[in-house]
Image (tube, rainbow, N blue to C red):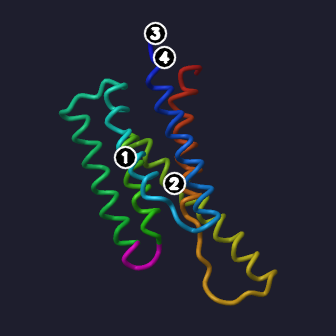
């Protein structure tokens, strides 16, 4: 008895983690460390299932992830993003090649901007004052879900 298609199983696990993290961030403005760790720890299985070579493929993925994590740590330092968001985007960088990850970042920015506008409108309508805490994990999760659909549906084009 086999385990089925490991790529499908890994994508399913990633989807569940992303949906769970997005919901948690929307509710409590926090993403559990174990969810980000699971995303990161599943990446090597993803590499293996997709036949990535240690050199240069895995090295490139790790370099991309470290670069992204370092850049988003700057955003965290200035209070532009939360720590869970930074860890999540760094872990996701281990899953996607550069071009696909670049598209993920664009979608993330657009969804994050739309989410920010919606939350500003809600704050105005409810006549609340103070800063708005944006659940950016929602934007990251949505963008990653859009990026995931690519390997699933590209086989039909």
Q: Between residue 131 and residue 20, name the one nearer to us.
A: 20
- State which tag comes first along the sequence, 4 or 1: 4
Identified at 48% across, 54% down, the residue is: 105
Relative height, residue 54 to residue 40 (above, below): above
The residues tagged by marks 4 and 3 sit, at their Cα atoms, a distance apart of 9 Å
In magenta, the rendered stretch is 76-80
Q: Which mark is residue 4?
A: 4
Q: Position of residue 154 (x, y in %)?
A: 54, 26
Where residue 101 appears, x then y in whole percent? 43, 46
Q: Looking at the rendering, which quadrant does residue 112 occupy?
A: bottom right
Q: Secondary structure at mark 4?
A: loop
Q: Is residue 25 above or below residue 36?
A: below
Q: 32 or 53, which is in the foreground?
A: 32
Give the farthest residue toward the front: 1
Pinpoint residue 94: horizontal percent, then vertical percent.
Answer: 35, 44
In the picture of the structure, the residue carrying the numbered disc 3 is 1
Residue found 37% across the figure and 44% down from its top: 98
């Amino acid at each position: 008895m086999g385990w089925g298609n490991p790529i499908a199983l890994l994508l399913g696990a990633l989807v569940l983690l992303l949906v769970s993290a997005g919901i948690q961030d929307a509710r409590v403005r926090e993403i559990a460390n174990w969810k980000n760790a699971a995303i990161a720890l599943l990446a090597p299985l993803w590499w293996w299932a997709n036949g990535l070579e240690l050199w240069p493929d895995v090295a490139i993925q790790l370099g991309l992830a470290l670069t992204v994590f370092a850049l988003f740590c700057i955003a965290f330092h200035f209070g532009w993003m939360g720590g869970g968001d930074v860890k999540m985007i760094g872990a996701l960088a281990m899953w996607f090649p550069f071009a696909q990850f670049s598209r993920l970042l664009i979608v993330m920015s657009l969804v994050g901007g739309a989410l920010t506008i919606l939350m500003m409108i809600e704050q105005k309508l409810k006549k609340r004052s103070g800063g708005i805490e944006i659940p950016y994990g929602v934007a990251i999760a949505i963008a990653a879900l859009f990026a995931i659909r690519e390997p699933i549906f590209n086989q039909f084009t």
